[in-house]
């Protein structure tokens, strides 16, 4: 069942169309502010009964103020039909409540319920097929997402006005990774093969580099923000991972790779940020406890090649890892112990490195299955459907890009899940940023941003999609501003 605060936001969003009909910008700002306040209240630990009472009273008050909704009982229907999506802005509002049934007894492996991915897809299809043509997917998060993203078309949503700012502090060394902070519009970080990480602030103007994190003796290959953005974890070719405090740039801990190998990628466990998964050049994946600096017992596994990409599903129970031999492995992740159990292997293309993996629970109302977005050195961006609870993959379609040798990455757009159509963004060796509609049968290209002078390696949206950052092999980071409608 969805978190109560997420249901409250859904009710607010359902009534949002009735607020200030002539001032759509106010409605958008209102729903974003409500989202922020509800996330903050979700951390207060109010009793579940009090939360449900607030939800009921909120619905009654809005009904008295604006009148009944156009569909009787729709608030209840929208609340109960919620299907969890990926780690978007909406998902952050979920207040995780301790549930021993979800975690399982300590020391006992409890994997994803058998058939859960098939069941999720069936639920998604069922709620969709009951709707009239052209309507929004009937979930409580759909109205909130639509209110935050706007009612414009997909092409209009991804029209950009130009460059907002250019960061060049890492010029002459590639910037393989750029990431906005979670649920943040104006905080950005990027890592460089010069061995440093930059933390940047885009507002107030002019955008500035707040601090540069130094300590790695060789290039930084990857980094990740924690869920609360208070720490960053980075991996380096110097065979260490480092834990950084984002507020003052302190290095909290340096952890050597258990194999003494170059570390190439990392990701936080989405539910338990005390655990981080890293991949190294000796073909190994390790689950690391960043509090102790130790490898988790049973949390290691070997791939067929150098581990270049990692991605969890939203609940954190499935992990995918890609290597430089062209294989993608899925692992069952034990939530109680951190143990990894190898499940499936897919050979995307023998000998073609897999450089990026992004997981999404629900791509769009047309694509109602859990999906995986994969970059590999085949001059293609690949979209796979997750078939079952063990992470089996089935190719849905591919998109043409230029990628034959560089570690290019791609992302799902954060607010696209409930909009007409669905968009993904990728870098490319043609020095452009490409946007594709995954549901458009022909002419899937939505937009192309030109401005880089080297292959584009990574892209990142901020939480409301108003800004997009891209980094390239020459060390330049460009922040693009979306057109305001």
Image (cartoon, rainbow, N blue to C red):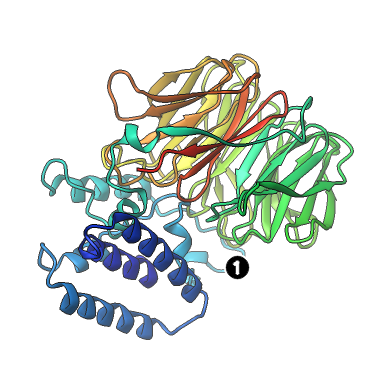
Q: Position of residue 87 (x, y in %)?
A: 48, 52
Q: Position of residue 162 (x, y in %)?
A: 50, 32
Question: What residue lies at 65% left-to-right and 23% top-to-bottom?
Answer: 324
Question: What residue lies at 22% left-to-right and 54% top-to-bottom?
Answer: 138
Can residue 228 be seen? Answer: yes
Quadrant, the C terminus: top left
Give the answer, above or below, for where 75 lies relative to 115. below
Can residue 80 be seen? Answer: no
Label 1 CA crowd tier, 10 Å (few <14, some 14–19, many 20+): few
The picture quadrant where one finds residue 27 is: bottom left
Q: Position of residue 345 (x, y in %)?
A: 53, 31
Q: Which residue is mark 1?
A: 106
Q: Nearer the viewer, residue 116 or 462?
A: 462
Give the answer, above or below, for where 272 lies relative to 190. below
Q: Nearer the viewer, residue 207 or 78?
A: 207
Q: Residue 241 vs residue 141: left or right? A: right
């Amino acid at each position: 069942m969805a978190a109560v605060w997420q249901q409250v936001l859904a009710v607010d969003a359902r009534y949002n169309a009735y607020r200030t009909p002539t001032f759509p910008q106010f409605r958008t700002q209102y729903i974003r502010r409500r989202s922020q306040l509800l996330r903050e209240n979700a951390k207060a630990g109010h009793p579940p009964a009090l939360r449900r009472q607030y939800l009921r009273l909120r619905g009654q008050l809005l009904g008295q103020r604006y009148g009944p909704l156009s569909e009787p009982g729709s608030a209840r229907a929208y609340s109960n039909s919620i299907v969890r999506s990926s780690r978007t802005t909406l998902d952050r509002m979920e207040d995780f409540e301790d549930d021993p049934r979800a975690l399982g007894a300590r020391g006992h492996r409890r994997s994803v319920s058998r058939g859960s991915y098939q069941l999720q897809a069936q639920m998604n299809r069922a709620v969709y097929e009951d709707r009239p043509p052209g309507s929004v997917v009937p979930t409580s998060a759909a109205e909130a997402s639509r209110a935050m993203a706007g009612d414009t078309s997909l092409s209009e949503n991804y029209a950009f006005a130009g460059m907002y700012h250019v960061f060049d502090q890492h010029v002459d060394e590639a910037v393989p990774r750029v990431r906005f902070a979670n649920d943040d519009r104006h905080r950005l970080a990027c890592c460089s093969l010069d061995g440093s990480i930059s933390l940047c602030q885009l507002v107030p103007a002019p955008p500035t580099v707040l601090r540069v994190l130094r300590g790695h003796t060789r290039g930084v290959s990857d980094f990740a923000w924690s869920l609360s953005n208070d720490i960053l974890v980075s991996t380096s070719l110097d065979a260490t991972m480092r834990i950084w405090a984002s507020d003052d740039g302190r290095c909290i801990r340096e952890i050597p790779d258990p194999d003494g190998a170059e570390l190439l990628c990392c990701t936080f466990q989405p539910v338990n940020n005390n655990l981080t998964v890293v991949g190294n050049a000796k073909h190994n994946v390790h689950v690391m406890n960043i509090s102790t600096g130790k490898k988790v017992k049973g949390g290691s596994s070997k791939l067929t090649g150098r581990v270049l990409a990692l991605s969890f599903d939203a609940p954190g129970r499935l992990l995918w890892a890609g290597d430089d031999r062209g294989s993608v492995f899925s692992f069952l992740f034990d939530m109680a112990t951190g143990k990894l159990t190898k499940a499936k292997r897919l050979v995307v293309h023998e000998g073609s490195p897999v450089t990026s993996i992004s997981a999404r629970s629900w791509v769009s109302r047309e694509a109602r299955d859990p999906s995986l977005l994969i970059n590999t050195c085949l001059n293609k961006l690949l979209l796979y459907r997750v078939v079952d609870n063990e992470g089996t993959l089935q190719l849905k379609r591919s998109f043409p890009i230029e990628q034959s040798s560089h570690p290019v990455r791609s992302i799902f757009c954060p607010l696209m899940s409930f909009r007409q159509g669905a968009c993904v963004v990728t870098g490319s060796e043609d020095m452009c940023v490409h946007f594709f509609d995954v549901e458009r049968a022909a002419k899937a290209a939505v937009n192309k941003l030109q401005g880089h002078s080297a292959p584009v390696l990574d892209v990142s949206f901020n939480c409301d999609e108003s800004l997009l950052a891209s980094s390239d092999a020459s060390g330049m980071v460009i922040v693009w501003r979306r057109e305001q409608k």
